[in-house]
Amino acid sequence: MAMRRSFPTVLSDRLPETRDFYVALLGFEVAFDSDWYVALRRGDGDGEHELAVWAVGHELVPPPYRADPAGVILTFLVDDVDAVHADARRLRVPLVAPPRDLFHGRRQMLVTDPNGMLVEISSPSTPSPAFTAELGRRGRAPETTG
């Protein structure tokens, strides 16, 4: 089986606000915009990134899934989380946790999007000596260190 592409889709009852949130904070561009579906793209040196926003009440969304997001964290790895944090403050994005260094080699901040979706934005940082030693014993952790 060949996979052509994959991307997350956020269910929203606030399409314009959600679109504008990801455009303003993370630099996505609008590739398609309708009253029920928005496709966002960002192309840069590391490849193409995509995100979709789908109207939560649309007939194509099965009724049991027309609810607020739960059990999901949308993660974006960026070069400079502190710069994104400055933008988030300027844009008055709801901040859950300011940038902080984590033991596994990430500098992370947490925000929520207009739908209440938890969004992690992080940059590579230096892992703790204990975590580095654990990596040496167990092998590289999947995408936790940059």
Image (cartoon, rainbow, N blue to C red):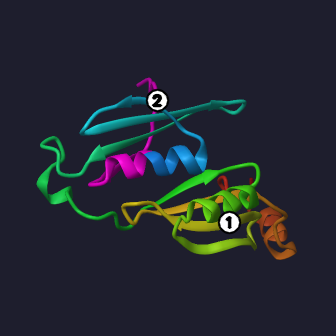
Q: Where is residue 25 in the image (x, y as percent from the top left)?
A: 58, 51
Would you place residue 5 above or below residue 87 in this image? above
Q: What element carries label 1?
A: strand
Of circles 1 and 2, which is in front? 1
Say left or right for 48 vs 79.
left
Q: Nearer the viewer, residue 48 or 58?
A: 58
Q: In this view, does 45 lie to the left or right of 56?
A: right
- Residue type, mark 2 in image: Arg
Q: What stretch is highlighted in magenta?
A: 1-19
Q: Residue at x 18, y 47 (%)?
A: 61
Query: Mark 1 = which residue?
Result: 108
Tell which circle, 1 or 2, labels the residue nearer the N-terminal end.
2
Residue tagged 2: 5
93 and 50: which is toward the camera: 93
**What residue is at 55 percent from the left and 65 percent from the top?**
92
In this picture, is 25 found above or below 4?
Answer: below
